[in-house]
Image (spheres, grey):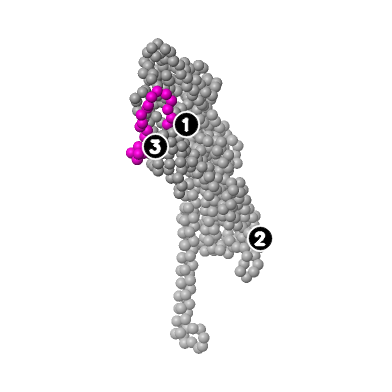
Amino acid sequence: MASGKLSPRQKMINLMYLVFIAMLALTMSKKVLTSFGRVYEDLKSSVELTKQKNAQLLSELSAKAQEQPEKYADKFKDAQSLNQLTVDFQSYLDKFEKDLFKKYGQDPAKPDYESLDKGFKLDEIFFKGEGLTKTGKEFLDKVNQYKKSLLEFAQKYGDEAAVQRIQKRFNTDPVKLKGGGKIDWMHYTFEDFPAIASLTNMARLESNAVNSENELLSSMFQSQLKSDVSFKNYQAVVLLDKSAFFPNERVKGKVVLGRYDQTMTFEKAVINGKEVSAEQMQNGQVLVDLPAGNPGDKDLKGFLEFKEGDSLVKLPFEYTYSVIPMPNSAVISADKMNVVYKGVENPLSISVPGIPDNKVKVSIPGANFKKVKPGHYLVNVTNYKGRNIEIVVSWKLPNGQTKTDRKTFRVKNIPAPLGTISGQDGYVKLPKRNIEIGTVGAKLSNFVFDVKLIVTSFDFKAPGQPTIHVNGTRLNQRAKSALRRVRKGQTVQIFNIKAKLQGAGSYKLPKTAPVIIEISN
């Protein structure tokens, strides 16, 4: 098109073609920048979503550590450390990106991606000739240190697949060039690129960080959780309507799994050598209905068979009951639980089948108790020193003979409370204002009694600042001042919460679990 002698008209046409091609190239460049911006936004949204999932998982693990400390306490501490490392790393990258937007005169909330086509400002921040500036070295050190910490967690819990993923996601080794030679990772990743491309690479590091945390949290606890819910850890339990029967009565009750599930279905159920009918297997239960027989001890045994994956699991059960001519055992049961707790009045129902209440006498050595109505008692074991307590019941038979029965109950302390801020416990995400005006409290999760806990004091800890002791249930001025210096994305802790049980006198509760709060704005 440009060879030979051209007329003025042809020269003009050629010039117009060149201008047209340049315009196409410019339009394509702007579209590419906008596409990078959309990828950046998607990555940031994904980061926030994964952070929420990680926070929820951490909260659930906190509850597990409270319920079963021997299984989960150490792992939960590791999970907290991992979460804090990720929060700090992701917050560092997020702040770096916002500062870079501002250097280009952009509002981080509403940037114009098409104007982020030059990379010279980031080059000035990161590079000094063929080397790195102080900021560039700091950035590289942050990535490498975070990678090192992740690998320690992955190796501790034996997750080889996670080790390989982390090595790949945070690989900062020099890059081999096609034409030969090598170039360091920082220059290869960030030098001479449009600013939006570099911002997208930083957001990708954020996404890799929160996803790696999620995978490691799952790796830490997946095997334990899988073991806990496996059918092989269930037990078949025989629940008869009562433990003793008169002659000519029918023995009625049910056989269920220890972890009862109404959706459970059985392949087969056998009781005393006889397979039960389909009608007797309902809602995860096997209904028992057979003759009691003559007086004496009777065995009820068999097995339940069900599918687990591609295999059949058979769980045996065995139970002994008595057929008696006259009552010779008391029926003693806790109204709400199988144990009695210190610090509260425990309701007990005590009766003997066929014997009037006025002929039944109750004795509980070492405990305070009172009868509130026929067959119902309130027992207080707050000052009881032992681990088990014996309840003695005696009664007179119609023929004048006196019978005695004893039952042993476990004595337990009230479980450790959970600390709360504005009613929320575990790991929460709140604005500073909500923390300033929020009330610090304590609660007992899923406790069988309706009790009230009173908080008298707590400690407040902000990153890089001394611990502040607070009397009462709200932050004092020193704590509020410390809170105002905390940045978005950082976490503060409310711990050493002193709580007492209303109406329980000098009874001391176990240590209250702390509250971890991520600052949202």
User: Crowdedness of circle 3 by 10 Å Cα count: few (<14), some, many (20+)?
Assistant: few
- Name the element at disc 2: strand
Q: Nearer the viewer, residue 170 or 351?
A: 351
Residue at horizontal 49 percent and vertical 61 percent from the top: 36
Q: Is residue 8 above or below residue 95?
A: below
Under mark 2, the amino acid is: Gly
Kindly identify which residue carries mark 1. Answer: 444
243 horizontally vs 152: left or right: left
Residue 129: horizontal and vertical position, in percent?
65, 63
Under mark 1, the amino acid is: Leu
Mark 1 vs mark 3, CA separation in Å: 46 Å
Under mark 3, the amino acid is: Lys
Residue situated furthest bottom in the rendering: 5
Q: In the drawing, what numbered circle is on residue 274?
A: 3
Regarding residue 431, the answer to whether it shows in the image is: no
* Residue 188 drawn in magenta: no
Residue 93: horizontal and vertical position, in percent?
55, 52
Q: Nearer the viewer, residue 507 or 336?
A: 336
The disc, 2 or 3, on the residue closer to the chain's N-terminal end is 2
Residue 3: horizontal and vertical position, in percent?
51, 86
- Name the element at disc 1: loop
Kindly identify which residue carries mark 2. Answer: 131
- Name the element at disc 3: strand
The disc, 2 or 1, on the residue closer to the chain's N-terminal end is 2
Residue at horizontal 54 percent and vertical 22 percent from the top: 386
Choose mark 2 or mark 3, whichever is in front: 3
Provide the residue span drawn in magenta.
275-300
Choose mark 1 or mark 3, whichever is in front: 3
Q: Nearer the viewer, residue 379 or 425?
A: 379
Residue 213: horizontal and vertical position, in percent?
54, 48
